[in-house]
Image (tube, rainbow, N blue to C red):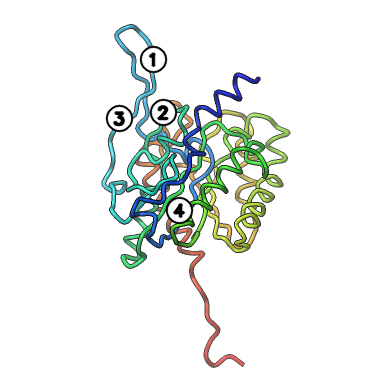
Amino acid sequence: MLPLLLLMLLSHSRWVATANVTNGCNSIAKNIFILSGQSNMSGRGGVFNQTSSSGTVNLTWDGIVPPECQPNPSVLRLNGGLTWVEAHEPLHKDIDVNKTCGVGPGMSFANELKMDDPDIGVIGLVPCAIGGTNITQWVRGGWLYNEMIRRTKVALQGGGTIRGMLWYQGESDAIDLDDAKLYKGRLKKFFKDVRRDLELPTLPIVQVALATAPGPYMEVIRKAQLGINLPNVRCVDAKGLPIGPDLLHLTTPAQVQLGKMLANAFLQTQRVFLPSSNSN
């Protein structure tokens, strides 16, 4: 157990590096979005098995970046060293370091927001997703949770506003029936804890209802996700989006579509309905 813990700490050492505030990007006010969850948020679009001449099978990203995910000078990401840099795929390459990362929904999301509102300014993405994680690993006080909150607070240091959180997780909880039954309560507590620790009681959260799962209880998880009724929490349904040959991860085109769905759902949280001027 101890060697495994040491390996995790070493693998993610860049997460806890001292923030570099000398980069010019750090002084720009940003619209900050947290990207969190597990592998389909981290991104596996374009990741495939490649067999070497020796017969070894390795996961490799094909390097294909669709137009909707191309870099934009006004879309930044907080990298593993806690420095703002221009965002480009794979967004989680130095965060989800024990896995092969590909295209996720983050860049499509950001570019869709900029298309909807060209005057939105700089978008700052804070990647935090880790593949293969159960929601119990994201419990308040746990290492993944604490690092997510820490990275988000560092993101604020150079100026900006936390505009929302994108959450795609639950596949790992579909393996065990007890985990699946407890998922809704754990998810609601997680969302409430994030809002409390960031001191943002109405933080917009857009979560994703599962498209796939490695276990038999996906529909239990989906029912929990679709049934969350917290204020300013939206759910987009990934079921039906194209999946890869591993039958678990979304393809690159699916991730592009998901990013657009997340952007549209976020924009719905921003609509303000003012009272009629002739109301009594």
Q: Mark 1 points at which residue?
A: 57
Measured Cα–Cα span from mark 2 to mark 4: 23 Å
Please give the name of the residue rendered at 59% of the width and 39% of the height, measured from the top-left corner: 144
Whether the residues at callouts 1 and 2 have beta carbons within 8 Å, the answer is no
Q: Mark 2 points at which residue?
A: 100
Of the pair 82 and 124, the residue shown nearer to us:
82
Q: How crowded is mark 1: few (under 14 residues within 10 Å), some or many (20 or more)?
A: few
Q: Where is residue 268 in the image (x, y as percent from the top left)?
A: 48, 64
Q: Position of residue 202 (x, y in %)?
A: 60, 63
Q: Residues within 10 Å of mark 3 (few under 14, many from 20)?
A: few
Whether the residues at callouts 3 and 1 have beta carbons within 8 Å, the answer is no
Q: Is residue 265 above or below residue 274?
A: above
Looking at the rendered structure, the number of numbered marks drawn on it comes to 4
Measured Cα–Cα span from mark 3 to mark 4: 24 Å
The disc, 1 or 4, on the residue closer to the chain's N-terminal end is 1
Of the pair 218 and 195, the residue shown nearer to us:
195
The disc, 1 or 2, on the residue closer to the chain's N-terminal end is 1
Measured Cα–Cα span from mark 1 to mark 2: 13 Å
Q: Mark 4 points at which residue?
A: 262
Secondary structure of the residue carrying tag 3 is: loop
Secondary structure of the residue carrying tag 1 is: strand
Q: Name the residue under label 3.
A: 62
Of circles 1 and 2, which is in front?
A: 2
Q: How crowded is mark 2: few (under 14 residues within 10 Å), some or many (20 or more)?
A: many
Q: Check disc 1 and give the amino acid type.
A: Val
